[in-house]
Amino acid sequence: MKVRDITSVIEEFAPLGIQESWDNGGLCIGSPDDEVHGVLVGFDCTPELIAEAVRRGLDMVVTHHPLIFGGLKRIVPGDPVSDAVSAAIRGHVAVYASHTSADKVIGGVSGAMARRLGLEDIRILDEEEGGVGLGAVGELPRPMEAEEALEYVKKCFSLKVIRSSRPVSGLITRVAMCGGSGGSLIGKARASGAKLYISGDISYHNFFTPEGFMVADIGHFEGEVEIVDILFSLLTKKFPNFATCISEDVRNSNPIHYF
């Protein structure tokens, strides 16, 4: 098995060419022609994830978030990105990320959020040419009051806490969402007719919402982590006898802690 065999399966699902212009998904470390004997799937490419891959004899990691976003000017001990890069090179571990490309297909991040909520008539929120785009929108299984809808969201995503704007009056039927940092799609969510928009990293001023519309912040990690299972399923379905593993600590790898 070669690196290109692994990446081709992922890119058939989420083509690298549709990623956002600012993104840095794809193969970050390694060559498409490198031999691969096992893949570890995680959420963030941390030094701990690379160490786990080496310990388990796996020579490629696939994550959602890219290891390197911008220009890397120096590699110094103690910096998490530097340590992960150094460990990957020393351990001969190829590193690949499927980030906004996996956000922009309905089978990816936002679609997974919608399916977790049991939404019906799911469609892309901010659709682009080719039937891809960011976010998703759909109808709740049944109309809900705002407080009930928020409790439903908390239950579906196993949340300890949810940040919300002022609850709307009346019943909510349509819900929009975007995994990760989705503040830029609030306008699209309102235009879709949704009364509730769910995302992460929503800034303070965006909680001042107009009458009949509300936003809820469930967290960045919480909205996106299911992509790990999706990527794992893609690879195991294509290569059922190949060593593909999910990181042992993926559910506890959220860098944000709640007390």
Image (tube, helix red, strand yellow):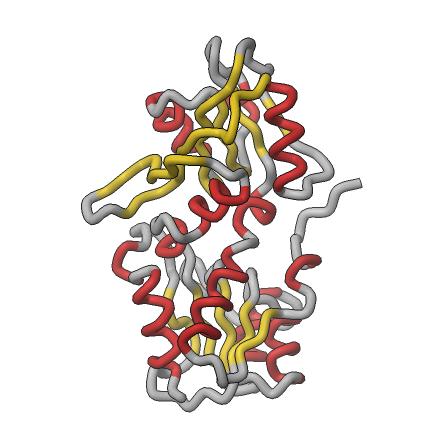
- Residue with the most extreme right position: 259
Instruction: Please tell me in which quadrant of the rendered image residue 99 appears.
Output: bottom left
- Closer to the camera in the image, 72 or 217: 217
Q: At 66% from the left edge and 84% from the top edge, which residue is drawn?
A: 55
In the image, is 253 to the left or to the right of 122?
A: right
- 40 over 123 or under it: above or below: below
Q: Is residue 93 visible?
A: no
Between 238 and 205, the one nearer to me in the picture: 238
Q: Please, is residue 22 above or below residue 175 in the view? A: below
Q: Residue at x 48, y 28 (%)?
A: 197
Where does residue 10 sit, x and y in percent of width and height?
Answer: 37, 68
Position in image of residue 90 (x %, y %): 56, 86
Quarter that holds the C terminus: top right
Relative vertical location of residue 211 with respect to residue 195 in this rendering, above or below: above
Q: How many marks?
A: 0
Residue 25 position, x and y percent, is 38, 62
Location of residue 81 with respect to 95 vertically, above or below: above
Residue 89 image point, x, y percent: 51, 83
Give the residue at x 69% y 65%. 249
